[in-house]
Amino acid sequence: MVRVMDFSYTEEDEMVRETAQEFVRKYVLPRRNKISYGGPLPDDIIKAAADAGFLGFNISERFGGAGGSIQQMSIIVEELAKGDVSMALPVFVLLVNGWPFMLERYGSEEAKEEILPSVVKGRTFFGIGSTEPSGGSDVMNEKSKAERRDGRWIASGEKVYISGVGESMRLPGGGGFLTLLRTGDKSLGSRAFTSFAFMIKGTDGNVKEGVKTTLFENIAREGLSTGGFSFDGVDIDDKYRVGDVGKGFHIIMEGFNIARIYVAAACNGAASEAISMGIEHLKTRNLFDQPLGRQEGLQFELADTYTKLQSSRLLTQRAAWLLDRVYKHGEKVPLSEQNLAVSMAKMTAPPTAHEIITKVMVWHGALAYTKDSPLGAAQGGVMSYYVGAEGGINIMKLIIARELLGKEFLSYKSA
């Protein structure tokens, strides 16, 4: 089937963009460096993001969301990243869209009614808790488990390098994570896993008994925490099970496809802002009695980096458009086609953004190495998604190769 992509944005899409741009001008740019280097996202910015409709934007109106498209959410995330190039705010927003969306698709009515409206109001955080101390990419060998007893689940294990642990403990309505737990024998393969809405602090403000949290010190993206949580014999009500028993692996993988689009959009936004800063610097910075922009070597670098950015943006836009065919229009798009589009976008955006930001830092010279410039925060922020978050670059390459060659060519056992 030939899919013809319409590159034009609708009037509603442009309204979404303008709303995000105005939000950045009003709330983000005046405090850009404080967000980049000054600790947790301010509570008033989280509240303002909720009031603007950015939190739970993808969630249906029934639970207080806007029922927005993946393309529109990508627009929001990209614009937010142009303001907060450290990635803290855009990543907070993309997490509380992509993963609550999966909860709405597969969760129980009771869990959805409890969690989703609170996420939309900015009272509750809800993200993804997948990575374990033994690694994040080898999901099939994760060890955290849950055993069913008398209609409930008893869970034990540990998750690490999780975004939003601090926010889950700090927000008045708590927070949690779509978490993958082993519920069957290893011989079952991917059917050995079930996903849960694991609330480390409930919407009632009570910390889950038996859960211990820890926080890591990020080298960048200081406005959004990275941490972990361990749990030993923790009781989980079956209402927090997300999807059927044994379907958790595929639910998590589906969620990653959406999250990877948003991550790519955020990286594109930070890179776009860096390019804009670079162009202004090349025009206005004078050395050797002329603007830097007259140096042919720098012109060539600008042409290369700008073209790479637009290529990355097009890959991301196509992936978002394709998944909207599935979720908004009900089209049957083969999973392999979805995986290819998403993985190409996620493989491209973080390294492209990192390359662009690094070049612009070199153009700026010593200033870029100080906290008076946001470029260092941008470089560190996108690096999080270069090294592994939401799937490392080499994992994206493996997915692309798998879809092109077939599973029989994989060097590892596939689900």
Image (cartoon, rainbow, N blue to C red):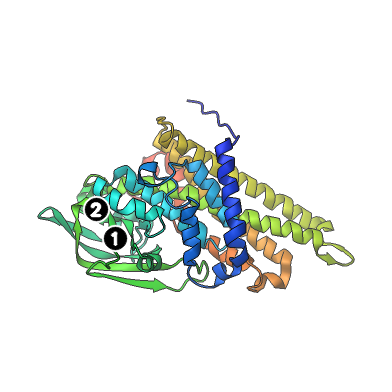
Q: Is residue 257 visible?
A: yes
Tell me if 350 is positioned left or right of 163 in this view: right
- Which residue appears at 36% of the width and 60% of the height? 131
Q: Quadrant of residue 214?
A: bottom left
- Which residue appears at 68% of the width and 65% of the height? 361
- Which residue appears at 50% of the width and 72% of the height? 39
Crowdedness near tag 2: few (<14), some (14–19) or many (≥20) residues, C-alpha within 10 Å: many
Tell me if 146 is positioned left or right of 121 in this view: left
**Residue 50, image x and y in percent?**
46, 55
Identify the residue under disc 1: 199
- Which residue appears at 37% of the width and 57% of the height? 126
For this orientation, the residue located farthest to the front is 51
Local secondary structure at mark 1? strand
Instruction: For marks 1 and 2, give the CA distance.
Output: 9 Å
Q: Nearer the viewer, residue 316 or 212?
A: 212
**Residue 57, image x and y in percent?**
45, 47
Residue type of the residue flagged with mark 1: Met
Residue type of the residue flagged with mark 2: Tyr
Instruction: Return the disc, 1 or 2, that comes first in the chain's sequence.
Output: 1
Tell me if 324 is positioned left or right of 181 in this view: right
Tell me if 364 is positioned left or right of 112 in this view: right
Say above or below: 44 vs 12.
below
Identify the residue under disc 2: 240
Say above or below: 120 vs 333.
below
**Residue 134, image x and y in percent?**
33, 64
For this orientation, the residue located farthest to the left is 150
Is the C-beta separation of discs 1 and 2 under 8 Å?
yes
